Amino acid sequence: MDLQHYQDLFINYLISERGYSKNTIESYSRELLRFITFVSSITSDIRCISQVHIIDYLRYLDGLNLSRRSQHHNMIVVRQFFKFLLRERYITSNPSALIDIPKVKMGLPEYLTVDEVESLLSQPDKKDKFGIRDAAMLEIMYSAGLRASEVCGLKTNDINLEAGFIRVLGKGSKERLVPIGQKAICKLKEYIESARNLFVKKGQIEYLFLNKDGKRLSRVGLWKILRHYAKLAGIKKEIYPHILRHSFASHLIQNGADLRAVQEMLGHSDISTTQIYTHLDTKRIVEMYKKYHPRG
């Protein structure tokens, strides 16, 4: 089999067995193709790819002036590729196993203050269906800490207003139940009862948040809506859909929420991903110390 065939087998595995999202699959396919193209000039036999070839590939990535984060992710893809090949017995040893992956320094995520969130959420004008929809959408993003794809993927039967929970389909098609606050419940109820039907053009559509054409709201559409209201609120920070998710987690941690509970609500598979918000809180404490301590 040629190298491209092994790539196809790996991508099919990610889709059928791991349940990776469309965006993740596109990213893995793009980065694995870069590796396959590189090693194809050396060998066409998957069993002949050695540790030396992968080290040469690392040097090649560095020569492309890719960021450390991008190099790191490229090598994560390569390592997972060879783990798959070894597991399926296409190879007898993993040439990537002992190679150090470029380290990435985790930056602290940007987040909004409570006042900024309040200002943002107060911007939608609920005199029309768009304002009612947007008010509900922004509220649930902050109330439940959802990713943009999770917001756009919500369906009407995922919402249980009486119990105060929503069912979220996250990365890897993993389901989780997330509680929502009273304000989010009220705004969702108003949207569902008085505005959502005004978006429906014909037939029934299961997605909760719809665009002007009566179709599922896209992530690009959500991003534009968020930036529009951030501008109205006078927020100077760089605005992107994840910022409400970061704000949700940061505010919970700052107010004493249990890290494991926040991990569950965010849908993180590894608690180390959630721990970055404790670092964020530490940074805030240090800033407060420097500001108020006489010898800070």
Image (spheres, rainbow, N blue to C red):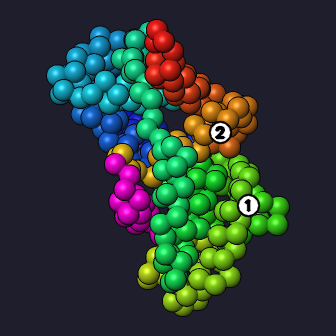
Side of 235 where 253 appears, left or right: right
- Mark 1 element type: helix
- Residue at the extreme right of the image, as rendered: 163
Q: Name the residue under label 2.
A: 252
Residue name at image x 51 percent, y 43 percent: 113
Side of 291 where 205 appears, left or right: right
- Mark 2 element type: helix
Give residue 97's position: percent from left, percent from top.
46, 14
Query: Dot 1: within a 10 Å radius of its alpha carbon, few (fewer than 14), some, or many (20 or more) residues?
Result: few
Residue name at image x 34 percent, y 48 percent: 236
Residue name at image x 38 percent, y 52 percent: 235
| Amino acid beneath label 1 | Gln
| Residue placed most toward the observer, 240 or 35 | 240
| Amino acid beneath label 2 | Leu
The magenta region covers: 215-236
Residue 182, disc:
1
* Residue 254 visible within the image: yes
- Spatial CA distance of label 2 from label 1 is 16 Å
Q: Toward which corner of the image does residue 257 lie, by quadrant?
A: top right
